[in-house]
Image (spheres, rainbow, N blue to C red):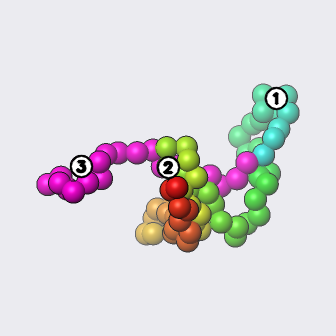
Amino acid sequence: MPDVQNPLGSAPVDVKVVLGKTKMALEDIINAEMGTRVELERMVGQPVDILVQDTLFGKGELAVVGNHMAVRVTELFDAA
């Protein structure tokens, strides 16, 4: 049953988790093959960015739940 107090509460939104970013030469991207490693600016163990509708929403850490990858939210940012 929809929430009468917040009718938008059940609206679907895009959620993305960004593991890291980098810059690469177009030539390196074109020549990439299976097994090519791409170094990211972020180190192992650092928080990942959680974006909602392409806006930074919070930070989290990677976790495993059963056989699935998950993100544990560790910090939420003020929407204002």
Instruction: Please state which amino acid type lies under the numbered disc 3.
Output: Pro
In three-dimensional space, the C-alpha distance between marks 3 and 1, rounded to whole angstroms, equals: 45 Å
Residues drawn in magenta: 1-21
Identified at 49% across, 49% down, the residue is 52
Identified at 77% across, 63% down, the residue is 43
Label 2: how many Cα within 10 Å (few below 14, some 14–19, many 20+): some
| Residue 41 % position (x, y) | 79, 54
Q: Which residue is mark 1?
A: 26
Which numbered disc, 2 or 1, marks the residue closer to the eye? 2
Q: Which residue is mark 3?
A: 7
Instruction: Please state which amino acid type lies under the numbered disc 2.
Output: Val
Instruction: Please state which amino acid type lies under the numbered disc 1.
Output: Leu
Identified at 65% across, 66% down, the residue is 47
Image position of 75 with respect to 22: above or below: below
Name the quarter where the N terminus is drawn: bottom left
Image position of 6 with respect to 74: above or below: above
| Residue 50 % position (x, y) | 56, 56
